[in-house]
Image (cartoon, rainbow, N blue to C red):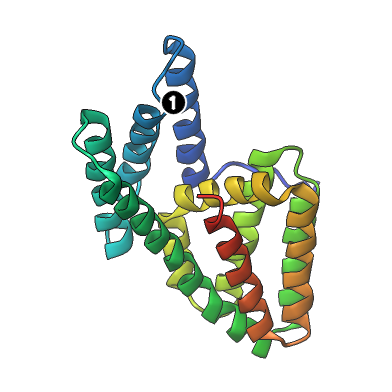
Amino acid sequence: MSRLDIKTPSRAQTVVEGLYRDVERRIAASPPGLCPVEMSLSFLQLCHAQTCGKCVPCRIGLGQLTKLISQVLDGTANMDTVRIIEKTARSILRLRYYLEAPALRDLAASHTAADLDTLRALQRQAEEAPDTAALAQALFRYHRGVTFLSGNTITPLLFNAFMQVNLEFWSGYIRSVGREESLRTLARFTDLIAAGQGDRAAQLLDDGLQRFVTTL
């Protein structure tokens, strides 16, 4: 019995799952021909409401996106508006790189056997994920774990604040490159960290982000 491990969802995970269920209910209750822009705006507003509001890209960027998409809905937008929407979304996404790249370099430069065991355990959770949503959550936990193991106690809190945005990124990434490629890349992160190649790990992250940007 001492080895029994009963896993309970964290508050953050419960909030995120509630967001997904809320969106699913809205879609199910909506009539045929639902406007995808209106649905995107509703989901963006949900994500914005769940942020901590302490940093500019999330607090200001998501609010600005809300205003811009609202212009598309009310018919006052033009092609410049669409370009600003894309630029703003890319800027928010770029923050993702600056949050994790230093942690990848620090962890690669200084890690213990226990650190690598933790990463491999998180990697196995990803490999055992039954579907895209579960895999996205596993990838989020792995990369949040990288920032925590690097010794940075602030960045994991930022990851939690951006949890919904991160999950959307990872879900889109998985759909873009496929499950197998996602898992191969994850294994590559572990190998590069173990080999002390932090710059290459950071480049691998950047490559993945840039690849995702091309799908926007």
Above/below status of 192 relative to 2: below
Residue at position x 79%, y 76% from top?
191
Of 109 and 29, nearer the camera is 29
Residue at position x 46%, y 50% from top?
165
Residue 103 seen in the figure: yes
Residue at position x 37%, y 43% from top?
47
Kind of residue indicated by mark 1: Asp
Quadrant in which residue 161 is drawn: bottom left
- 183 relative position to 92: left or right: right
Q: Position of residue 121 (x, y in %)?
A: 77, 61
Quadrant in which residue 66 is drawn: top left
Above/below status of 15 relative to 160: above
Q: Position of residue 76 (x, y in %)?
A: 18, 36
The mark total stands at: 1
Q: Position of residue 51 (x, y in %)?
A: 34, 51
- 136 relative position to 190: left or right: left
Instruction: Return the residue at label 1.
Output: 22
Residue 2 seen in the figure: no
- Helix or strand or loop: what does disc 1 sit on? helix
Density class for disc 1 (Cα within 10 Å; few <14, some 14-19, many ≥20) is: some
Above/below status of 196 relative to 143: below
Of 22 and 182, nearer the camera is 182
